Image: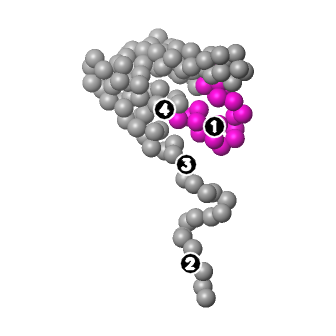
Amino acid sequence: MVEQTEQGLSDEYARASPWPIPIVLGIVISEIGIVFDGLLPVAVGGLLLLAGSVVGILRESGFASTLYRPALGVAAVFGGAGGALYVGTAATARGLAFLGTAVVVAAAAVALFLYETERL
């Protein structure tokens, strides 16, 4: 008797990754916040969703053993990108969104460090 298996599934990967949907939603929400004037907090929220997804992917895939290190890296990248956009281009709203996100992600990285080292 032939054993029935589902195509595309393997024993190595028992489940699918949940990260593609939050990444797409983060990009879309952040762009909506940038395109429509006065929705800068929406843009920051979308970028926070994107940043959290990137940190989660790095942790889940094994590239990072902690959460605070990739969070600090994402905060540094977003801060650098935001500063460059704000100072060097006319896209000041986009730069402010990146800078605001960098501040929040850096604060979250500090909280994650305190939590993971059992100081919080």
**Closer to us: 59 or 111:** 111
Give the Cα separation between the discs numbered 3 and 4.
Answer: 15 Å
Q: Which mark is residue 100?
A: none
Give the Cα separation between the discs numbered 2 and 4.
Answer: 38 Å
N-terminal of the two: label 1 or label 4?
Answer: 4
Does 48 appear above or below 103?
below
Q: Residue furthest bottom?
A: 1
Q: Which mark is residue 50?
A: 4
Q: Kindly identify the amino acid type of the residue bearing the numbered disc 4.
A: Leu
- Left or right of 47? Residue 115 is right
> Mark 2 sits on what residue?
4
CB within 8 Å, label 1 to label 4:
no
Does 48 appear above or below 63?
above
Q: Residue furthest top?
A: 87
Question: Is-magenta flag for residue 103?
Answer: no
Name the secondary structure under disc 2: loop
Q: Kindly identify the amino acid type of the residue bearing the numbered disc 2.
A: Gln
Q: Which mark is residue 17?
A: 3
Question: Is-magenta flag for residue 69?
Answer: yes
Name the secondary structure under disc 4: helix
The magenta-colored residue range is 53-72
Residue 19 pos. (x, y %):
51, 42
